[in-house]
Image (cartoon, rainbow, N blue to C red):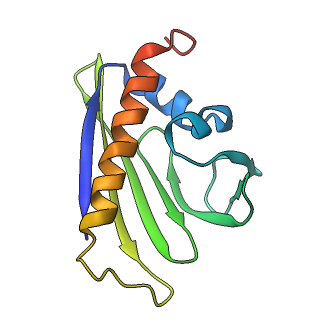
Amino acid sequence: MPKTNVTINRQPDVVWKYFTDCNTWEGWYGGGLEQVDPGWVAGARLVWKLGGSSTLETVAEGREVVVLGNFMKTWYRFIPQGTEATCVEIEFAPRGGAVFSDGGQANLVETKNTLLRLKQAIERTKKYA
């Protein structure tokens, strides 16, 4: 399964708060998150602004979120790097009959770009500091 990561120069709790704020997703993810119903817990439903939904398979607060979409399973991991930085790792695998014709390389590039946007957004904001 392809995976990539980026180190964000913010404390783990700051990165977690930013990640779990639906209002921030449109700026870094590339698609707006309307709501997480009933909240960031296993079994919750992520409702996307452009339509459709995904399910939170696993939520380990501050450490990991696993999202099940129709065609992709995605792991988001938050790994402390001391007290002042956080490595955010994303791993993904096709599901529901989907396959990667290129071994996931195109998706890996887009995922890395998504992580870089997340890094820039969090490091720019003072709201969560």
Residue 7 placement: quadrant: top left
Nearest the viewer among 98 and 12 is 98
Give whichever of 7, 106 is nearer the camera.
106
Residue at 35%, 52% (x, y): give it: 111
Which quadrant, please, contains the N terminus? Answer: bottom left
Give percent across and percent down for residue 84.
Answer: 29, 16
Taking the image as shown, residue 106 lies to the left or right of residue 123, namely left
Q: Residue furthest bottom?
A: 97
At 54% from the left and 16% from the top, the residue drawn is 128
Image position, residue 27 (x, y; %):
56, 34
The spot of residue 13 in percent (x, y) is 46, 25
Image position of 46 (left or right of 115): right
Is residue 89 left or right of 120 when viewed as pictured?
left
| Residue 96 vertical placement versus 88 (above, below) | below
Which residue is pictured at 44% across the width and 28% down the height? Answer: 15
Q: Height in image: 126 above or below 44?
A: above
Give x and y (percent) for residue 99.
37, 85
Q: Is residue 21 left or right of residue 1?
A: right
Residue drawn 44% across and 85% down?
Answer: 98
| Circle count | 0
Residue 64 vertical placement versus 68 (above, below)? above
